[in-house]
Image: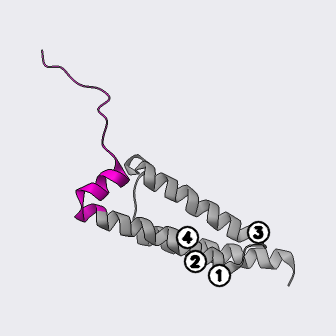
Amino acid sequence: MPEIVLILIRSIVAFILLFLMARFMGKKQISQLTFFDYCVGITIGSIAATLSVDQNVKIINGLVSLAIWGLFPIILAYLGLKSLVVSKITDGKATILIKMEKY
């Protein structure tokens, strides 16, 4: 199979999987992303890009890694809802940048 056709097919598969994962993982605005969510998003994008263009990566390996990186944050988010300890580990603690003093 010509290289360009293989890249086209792999890119379409990666795009569809990324689209489904994004819909499943939920919508968040950039300002609402935690550092953990931001890192996961970058990693998922990197895996999808590598899956699309690197023919040395078997497509099943790329799909499995995308599935793992897609499901793991969902599982951690669920555990974070149930456990304060997990929530503190994954989301961290808010930092107050400006404290208003009463006059």
Q: Residue furthest bottom?
A: 1
Which numbered tag is attached to residue 64? 2
| Residue at the (65%, 81%) spot, across then down | 60
Residue 19, image x, y percentages? 53, 71
Disc 2 to disc 1, C-alpha distance? 6 Å
Residue 6, image x, y percentages? 78, 79
| Residue at the (42%, 72%) spot, across then down | 24
Disc 3 residue type? Answer: Asp
Q: Are marks 2 and 1 in contact (CB under 8 Å)?
A: yes
Mark 3 / mark 1, whichever is N-terminal = 3
Which numbered tag is attached to residue 60? 1
- The residue that label 4 is drawn on is 18
Disc 2 to disc 4, C-alpha distance? 13 Å
Say whether residue 49 is left or right of residue 91.
right
Q: Which secondary structure lies at badge 4?
A: helix
Which numbered tag is attached to residue 54? 3
Disc 2 residue type? Answer: Val
Question: Badge 2: how crowded within 10 Å, few (<14), some, or many (20+)?
Answer: few
Q: Is residue 89 magenta?
A: yes
Question: Badge 4: how crowded within 10 Å, few (<14), some, or many (20+)?
Answer: some
Stretch of the chain drawn in magenta: 80-103
Mark 3 / mark 4, whichever is N-terminal = 4
Q: Residue furthest right?
A: 2
Q: Between tags 3 and 2, which lies in front? A: 2
| Residue at the (71%, 76%) spot, across then down | 10
Residue 25 falls in image quadrant: bottom left
Q: Is residue 13 magenta?
A: no
Q: What is the image's colouring?
A: one colour
| Residue at the (48%, 67%) spot, across then down | 22
Residue 98, image x, y percentages? 29, 26
